[in-house]
Amino acid sequence: MDVELTSLAHAHGVATSYEDWHREEREVSPASVVGVLGLLGVDATSPAAIRAALAAVPAAQDLPGTVVVRTGTTRPLPGPSRITLEDGTVREVAEIPAQIPADLPLGWHRLRHGDREVTLVVVPVELPEPPETWGWMLQLYALRSAGSWGMGDLGDLRTFVKHSHGAGLVLLNPLHAITPTLPVPSSPYSPSSRRFANPLYLRIADTAEYQGANAGTRDRIDALRPPNRDLIDYTEVWRAKLAALELLWPLATPPDRASDPGLTDFAVFCALAEKHGPNWQEWPAEPGEPDDDRVAFHVWVQHLVEQQLEAAKQAAADMSIGVVLDLAVGIDPSGADGWLLQDVLAAGVHAGAPPDAFNQLGQDWGLAAWRPDRLIETGYAAYRDMLRRIFRHAGGLRVDHVAGLWRLWWVPPGMGPAEGTYVHYDPEAMLGILALEAHRAGAVVIGEDLGTVLPEVTEGLERMNMLGSAVLWFTRDWDAPGGPYIPAADYPRNALASVSTHDLPTAAGFLVGEQVRVRARLGQLAGSVEDERRTADADRAQLLAALTAEGLITPESTPEDIVVAMHEFLARTPCRLVTASLYDVLGVLDQPNLPGTTDQYPNWRMPITTTLEQIQVDPRVARIAALLGARKGQS
């Protein structure tokens, strides 16, 4: 690659090479680097443009737009300065040499030097150690009960929590907001907004308005309930719930919109989307003013979801951690946050991931991404506000693709998912702010650090007392011949352990090689079917060998015995948290999501055929709960 282009890329945090999943160095094509620089507003399309852009690279500033320090530490200042603390207290820094005082409290402060004022964030050195406990991984939409409307909802969550067999946590799929138009997309990882919640999960019958309605209105609403289908129809569910909410809206007390301008802005987007369509990029240049009553309606709907989220949190109050929400790595660029946060997002980028063992063609998630330079300039306000809203109702937060706090794979427009490159962020800021908001909420943080992850990601999580992820399928000694599964005793302490994830084969699927059959049928394999089958067979044989070495199975063990053994294996690990998925415990063959597919596979739409009422009394569920609950340190 041209030396000047390399210098320009590095100046803007754009990688020109990376280590792939084979641990081999991969050069990034110049076209990819030029494309990503363009997404950062840097023209690198010609030698002259590259030289001009290099000349325009600003010198290191005495004060960047945001200064982040860990509590109890300091850093030099360019001269006498004034610090205005979060509570309004003013601290003058007059000594020479000037430095940030080491006794500043945690929080969001303002730092002024001369005529320049920037954000100063004091973050924790670490979070408290998470408790040692176990819990359930739950795709909430997949639950079905006598009270749900075609998909699982927050009423089902409360019921599940109350009958969780002594679990210390329930880890959910993302509950981020949709754009309230039709059709409704299926993926919880491509939300319209990460700051607000998904009204699809409302339990209509639990609202005060429904309970206060007359019998005739309740009968009309009950008649709207969609039937249970083989695949979840989110559009049908939202159509029914929207009709029900509109019947209840005249009975509601209009919400106070002035107290939460951010929510009102989101409601404005929702009202305009109903008028002009879900993609704001296709709206008229002047979309006009939305209907005032409709804005108030959408504020009210969010209040209802907030109330039911809080009720779920309270139902889990006796759990050592409680409800753990999931933070998607990005947002649908055509949705609410794409419209409202244009000042801090990279227009046109598609976030994704390079090729790895399970996604050999790479991944283009189609998600918008933060611009690191704009986050710094704006004091990370949008990032902070997003975290604060999520932590309101969470005892913990799982951060999907946590490596994205360090670097994120950007795919330029018109290129394939393997043709992107990494853009770097400031982990001291991204991780520190996450720790600050988690500390204030009294919540634990779990990072999904699977795939191609730099060592500093796992090290950074451990330093902060945040947990990584230890998935049975991946926790292997890749330096040994054949990459054998490591013994249970050698698992990391600082992790949440699980058999699988929503993106990987279920326990039953792994045992029969279902992932190979499905991916071959859909053309998702980079190699031959025969090679993939041999690999899957070898992986299964090695896992069975590991379970046999632990004394957990014998040649006579049934598939159900082997699944139990997988969980007993995890129970023997030193991991602080161990979780079980209903998909694994109930013997479900199909994984919830097959990365790299859209309509070819029913991602996020497959319900668990065992009802919630049946799950509560299923002996397989009770058996795994008793096994995990007996771990050392458990009550």
Image: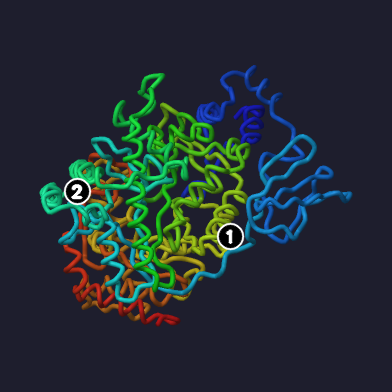
Q: Position of residue 207 (x, y in %)?
A: 26, 55
In the image, 205: left or right of 332? left
Residue furthest to the right in view is 96
Which tag, 2 or 1, sits closer to the chain's start? 2
In the image, 7: left or right of 19? right
Q: CA distance from mark 2 to mark 1?
A: 40 Å
Within 10 Å of disc 2 (Cα), the crowding (few <14, some 14-19, many 20+) is many
Q: Is there any visible trace of residue 472 in the rendered image?
A: yes
Within 10 Å of disc 1 (Cα), the crowding (few <14, some 14-19, many 20+) is few
- Point 68% across, 26% down: residue: 54
Residue designated by label 1? 459
Q: Would you place residue 454 above or below residue 615 in this image?
A: above
Looking at the rendered structure, the kind of residue marked 2 is Ile
Q: Position of residue 177 (x, y in %)?
A: 35, 44
Q: Position of residue 90 (x, y in %)?
A: 75, 50
Q: Quadrant of residue 25?
A: top right
- Between 68 and 623, the one lying in front of the other is 68
Q: SS of the residue at dot 1?
A: helix
* Mark number displayed over residue 232: 2
Q: Quadrant of the N terminus?
A: top right
- Point 41% across, 48% down: residue: 328
Q: Quadrant of residue 129?
A: bottom right
Looking at the rendered structure, the kind of residue marked 1 is Glu
- Between 331 and 41, the one lying in front of the other is 331
Q: Is there any visible trace of residue 514 in the rendered image?
A: no
